[in-house]
Amino acid sequence: MKSEIIKILSDKKYDALMSLPLSNGRLLSTLISLTYDRKSIISYRAIEAFGIVSKEIAKTRPEIVRNAVGRLLWMIRDESGGIGWSSPELLGEIVRNNPELFPDVAPVIMSFLDEEMLVSGVLIAAGRIGEVNAALIAHAIPLIITYLHNPEPKLRGLSAWALGRMKASQAEPELEKLKNDGCLIAIYEDGELKDKTIGNIAGEALERLNSG
């Protein structure tokens, strides 16, 4: 099944995943296993597909998705390190696609904002959740704003990206200060990794804030 899933992700035909067996949680486990190589676009697409599949499974077997939440949280805390780095994003996709079923997971994700190895994923999760239900993570906005001043370009860019999707109006003054930041980072959007300057990301965020 793994090779079939990779082909589906390569073609960006996520709907085809629904024809695979959903009831035993194996599909979710396989998608998790495909997120470990962050140099591959398949990893990013697997994360996105994970959320889409979780929504379908939760319609009839929400306990399978709840079990996946538990596994991902265990992976974050696992002392072997490394394997849980994608967990915040995977958990974010669960909340994004099932905000009514798993609202309690959102603040748990945000609780890892001060973890150096996880913060990138948490910021991505914040943006993804923020697009559908920003109220679930509104309490984290002040801390996310502080990352706009981080010396690491990736964190500045991801925080700007997240705050725009959360429509965090209180971030507007600080986002304005980033409009001339020429550092490039890679952002995953529309199934692809795109190189953008932090200034462009901040500008797009400001447009979202002012779009009503």
Image: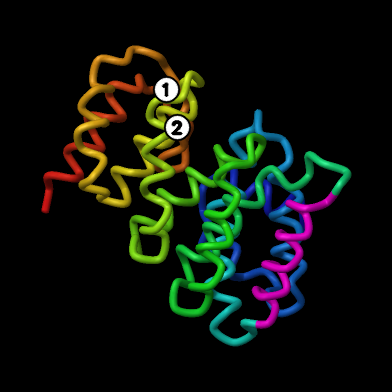
Number of numbered markers: 2
Which residue is found at the position 86% from the left and 47% from the top?
79
Percent position of residue 47, x then y = 59, 51
Reading the image, the residue beneath label 1 is 195
Magenta residues (range): 63-78
Percent position of residue 171, x then y = 26, 40
Picture quadrant where residue 174 is located: top left
Picture quadrant where residue 27 is located: bottom right
Q: Which mark is residue 128?
A: none
Q: Residues within 10 Å of mark 2 (few under 14, many from 20)?
A: some
Picture quadrant where residue 162 is located: top left
Reading the image, the residue beneath label 2 is 187
Percent position of residue 8, x then y = 60, 51
Q: Is residue 93 magenta?
A: no
Which residue is found at the position 67% from the left and 67% from the top?
69
Mark 1: which amino acid? Asp
**CB within 8 Å, label 1 to label 2:** yes
Mark 2: which amino acid? Ile
Q: For the residues marked 1 and 2, what is the alpha-carbon distance in whole angstroms? A: 6 Å
Colour scheme? rainbow
Residue 18, compared with residue 42, is above or below; it is: below
Dominant SS type (magenta): helix
- Left-right relation of 138 to 179: right
